[in-house]
Amino acid sequence: MDPQVVDLRSDTVTRPTPAMRRAMYEAEVGDDVYREDPTVNRLQERAAEIFEREAALFVPSGTMGNQSAIKVHTRPGQEVICEERAHILNHEMGMMSAFSGTVPRAIRAEDGILKWELIAPQIRGRSDHRSRTGLVELENTSNLAGGSVYPRELSDEICDRAHEAGLPAHLDGARIFNASVALGQSVPDLTRKFDSVMFCLSKGLGAPVGSVLVGSKNFIEEARLVRKMLGGGMRQAGVLAAAGLVALEDSPKGLHIDHENAKFLALGLADFPGIKIDPSKVVTNILFLDVSGTGLISFEISKRLAVQRVLANGVTPKTMRMVTHYDVDRAGCERALQALREVLGVKQKKVFA
């Protein structure tokens, strides 16, 4: 990536740090399908330790981690309860249906945060006419809801009630470390009651490739078989796992900076005529802005920003998303705001001492 480009499309665009590159170069490797890659084994052991779980599994992507969990937890013909904007529904290519034979039961919730009173009426037991609920899934942080976070008491209650109903609960924790920083609570405390958790190494944590699935030993053994079905049986994967280990140990310490930069952007954008954004709802590293009042559709704004060497994606014709990460510093955020001023013809407010 050109260092002069301010890339706000996603935190997936992060480049490996020098420490990650060094670890990759020096990684001790073996054949992971034979469970003989010592670096992969260390990553899995460390992830299980951090999450206070029995076992963990390194997978190439968050999608593979989520879909492996769905396959293990459900049977064909069942429903998966999730929020309407869930990643498993909107960005995983219909895989829950294609691979596991399940269908989503999507529920709209304010800020993407489900509550038990919304879930309870949607749970379906045995019937001669309707599909049966097989799994409850939450996402923390909620990507398409602007990086919103689940308070621990809400997610704990949902897990408790799901278990009382005989249902497993899975967490898409792609950005769970962002949620941990935002809430000031530990990752194991936020995830303890879920039957399985997937988290990404390749988003805000900055590793080049990979995610990890954690759970019980029995669950992970089953998930390992599903990973192989999906073509995720990697060989000398320690080269990738080495970067993941560095990301796991070092990157959470800097996530608060990404959150501060996202808030800085949101506060700046709130002053733009024609743009609607509520900075109080920007609590992690993701922000959505309504550009419908500017007279331009988001995709046109995106094109014009790219000419200014600022990258940000339109999501719908009236909505754009921006995501901060460690490759975008405060100066980069200021450049992004200035570029948008030029695109929209907005004069910068004068500051008087």
Image (cartoon, rainbow, N blue to C red):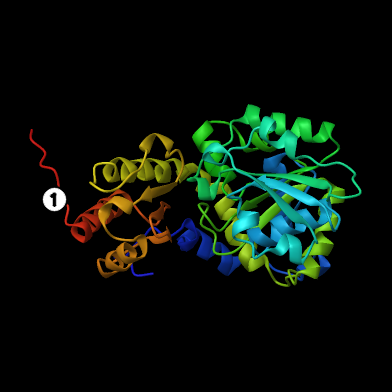
- Which of 304/290 is in front? 290
The kind of residue tagged 1 is Lys
Residue 18 visible in the current orientation: yes
**Residue under the point 86% across and 41% down:** 125
Which is nearer the eye, 111 or 63?
111
Say which quadrant the C terminus sits in. top left
Q: Is residue 239 above or below residue 279?
A: below
Task: Left or right? Give the position of 96 relative to 240.
Answer: right
Q: Does residue 189 appear in this view?
A: no
Q: Position of residue 130 (x, y in %)?
A: 84, 49
Badge 1 element: loop
Residue 15 x, y percent position in the rendering: 46, 63
Q: State whether residue 256 is above or below residue 91.
A: above
Work out which residue is located at the far front of the displayed protein and give it.
129
- State which quadrant residue 151 falls in: top right
Q: Which residue is mark 1?
A: 347
List the single residue furthest toward the left.
352
Q: Residue at x 42, y 40 (%)?
A: 282
Q: Quadrant of residue 160?
A: top right
- Counting labels gives 1
| Quarter of the picture holding the N terminus | bottom left
- The percent coordinates of residue 222 (x first, y second) are 85, 57
Please report the residue visible at 27 percent of the width from the left and 43 percent of the height from the top: 268
Q: Residue furthest top?
A: 153
Q: In the picture provided, is 173 more to the left or to the right than 266?
A: right
Instruction: Provide residue 53's location: percent of width, then percent of height.
Output: 76, 42
Foreground residue, 290 or 271?
290
Instruction: Give the left or right position of residue 250, taking residue 192 as reference.
Output: left
Vertical comparison of 253 with 328: above or below: above
Q: Specify few, some or many for label 1: CA neighbours under 10 Å numbering under 14, 14-19, or 20 or more.
A: few
